[in-house]
Image (cartoon, grey):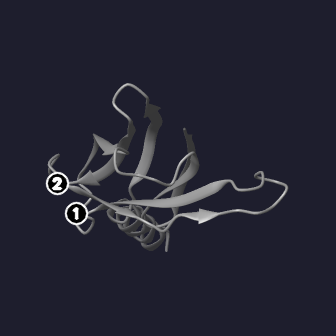
Amino acid sequence: MTGSLLIFAVMMMTATTAVLADAFGSVHYDAKRDQIVVTMIYDGTHPNHHFAVHWGRCHTLHDQIQGPGRKIINLGIVDEQGNDAARKRYTKVVRVSLADLSCRPATVTLWTSPNQFTRLDIP
């Protein structure tokens, strides 16, 4: 019975390793280049993953907590090779230009799969 439990535990650890999600490392606003700079942490078989950037719609809040007229916007950063087998951990810096973003100043909520998120205020 102990051998069966050991095999089950190894199977569970292997399954868990295979489904590790993308995560954020450091996230900051680069004022000089007007960019959000994100270090993505991901698992895969190679370091050349491409990350797609998906902007949501700009919303204006009208409440006392965030301040009247405060703008918020979602930013999805999605690993286009998200189904790559989790063999090794990699990091990649993703730079997102804000040059054409009119939703400012704003709080940007950055999302990646499955439910990793962080927030950043931009001027």
Mark 1, residues whose alpha carbon is within 10 Å: few (<14), some, or many (≥20)? Answer: some
Residue at horizontal 32 percent and vertical 51 percent from the top: 42
Residue at horizontal 29 percent and vertical 53 percent from the top: 43
Gap between marks 1 and 2 measured at Cα: 6 Å
Q: Amino acid at mark 2?
A: Thr
Residue that lies at the very extreme toward the top in this rendered image: 32
Q: How many marks?
A: 2
Quadrant in the picture for residue 33 = top left
Seen in the image, is 52 located left or right of residue 110? left
Residue at horizontal 53 percent and vertical 60 percent from the top: 73
Dot 1: element = loop
Q: Which residue is mark 2?
A: 45
Mark 2, residues whose alpha carbon is within 10 Å: few (<14), some, or many (≥20)? Answer: some
Seen in the image, is 76 located left or right of residue 89? right
Dot 2: element = loop
Q: Which residue is mark 1?
A: 85
Give yes or no for contact between labels 1 and 2 (Cβ–Cβ under 8 Å).
yes
Indicate the position of residue 41 as horizontal and vertical percent values: 36, 46
